[in-house]
Amino acid sequence: MITEEINFVSKLNNCDIKTYKECLDKYTNNFEKVLKLETDFPIFLDTNVLLRYYSISFTAREKLFDFIDKNKHRIIITNQVQKEFLKNREDVIKKYFEQVTNKIPKDFSSDIVNKLKSFIEQHKIILKDYPYVETGIMKHKEELEQILNQLNKDSEDKYSEFKNLIWKDKFLDLLCECKQINNLNQQEIILIKSKFDNLKNDIKPSNIENILNTTKSIFPGLCDIKEKPENPYGDFIIYHEIMKYMIQEECESIFLTFDNSKGDWMSKNKTAYIHYVENMYLNTNHIIYILDAERTLEKILNVDIDSLINLINVEQSDITVISINAILKTHYIFRNTEFSGATKHIVTELLVNNYKHNSEIIRDLDKISEIMEVFKKENPNYSSLGFFRFALRIVNPNYRKIVRRGGSIENNPEHFYTKIEKYINMLNSFS
């Protein structure tokens, strides 16, 4: 049972040196095997891992499907995860169709076919002097228009698949074969929520970013006080669902999550919080391994499992074109730089790189002010917006995506990072 004596709050700051060392030794002894998922420990999947299936490429979906199928005997889906998954599943499927499948023919038309037509129109007089150019272009124009027609047709077919997926879904069938648990009774849930309320009593949503810099003060669900104020208990409940299972089964466990952008399951550098592991050890006498699903699964599956759609609820974000332009005009890091304003695609870029609030952006800019003075001297021609994007990419190792003006999302190529590697190393040496 989860009781007054057995819960996250009861064991906070309650460890002696001997037990602490014992916990660390047990954790590190198995860590390399756990990272490769080579142990037989049960694997708990976070909601975002299940939902990611519907937002990645179909090649990646098949590999993720095969992974879950192969490990379904030890994959556990808690009751809270089931609720969150079912609440969001249909919306994610719909978003994928709207933002990826339905968008491809539109982007192909605007970015390729229409630009080719525009080029011919703009240069039609001079092209008369280069007949082979015009002939070649017209030939490719016809081919591209045929491709566009086929894309439009296939998009319609995909729409039928999208509608069918809502009702008939092999992934749902597979999840039914995994172990599903509903192990907390109503009394325990009331107790867990009351403990969470005690933790959040003195926390102001505006101060959460500062708390994230004080590791021992972080707890599961901390960021949801701001992001889901009406019901912030989900992560805290999941933590205790895992806790009760580990007590009953007397076992270690693995928790896979993509939720490292908030910072309340693991730090932004994708490492687990020691006090979570310590707390679980004090409550269960066993070790929990909280792993970044992106790093773990990409290595095991050998496939890119980046989400192709923006799963962030924009309504939860205070980042806008106006707010970014205000930062570009007022933050001291941009003094003596030529102002260039942000547009909508910059806001999207910040969101897909897991920034949700202006306070997070300002926090990262504050961290890198000294390095950017060096950058500014060595690269004096950058405008404030270019300077802004470079600064965030240097300070934030998770800033890996760029958004084009047309809305397409791309991963920054590795060669780009050779340009900023020097500054990243400088920042690391400072810290």
Image: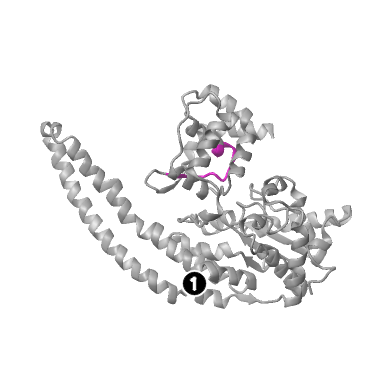
Disc 1 crowd, CA 10 A, few/some/many (<14, 14-19, 20+): some
Res 168 seen here: no
Tell whether 271 sits left or right of 82: right
Q: Does the magenta segment cover residue 394?
A: yes
Quarter holding the C terminus is top right
The residue indicated by pointer 1 is: 171
Looking at the picture, does residue 168 appear above or below residue 240?
Answer: below
- The amino acid type, in three-letter code, at marker 1 is Phe
Q: Residue at x 52, y 75 (%)?
A: 174
Residue 84: percent from left, percent from top? 58, 68
Q: Quadrant of residue 124?
A: top left
Q: Nearer the viewer, residue 315 or 387?
A: 315
| Residue 153 sits above or below residue 129 on the image | below
Q: Residue at x 20, y 56 (%)?
A: 146
Residue 150 position (above or below residue 357): below
Judging depth in this view, the residue of 104 and 286 nearest the camera is 104
Query: Total label count?
Result: 1
Where residue 388 sits in the image (x, y, percent)? 52, 35
Residue 293 included in the magenta stretch of the image: no
Quadrant where the image shows the N terminus: bottom right
Q: Residue at x 51, y 32 (%)?
A: 387
Q: How is the image coloured?
A: one colour
Magenta stretch, residue numbers: 392-403
Depth check: give the residue in front, 371 or 32. Answer: 371
Percent of width and height locating residue 27: 75, 57
Q: Residue at x 86, y 56 (%)?
A: 15
Above or below, 415 against 308 in this view is above
- Observer able to see residue 415: yes
Q: Give the secondary structure at mark 1.
A: helix
Quarter of the view holding residue 99: bottom left
Q: Position of residue 8 (x, y in %)?
A: 78, 62
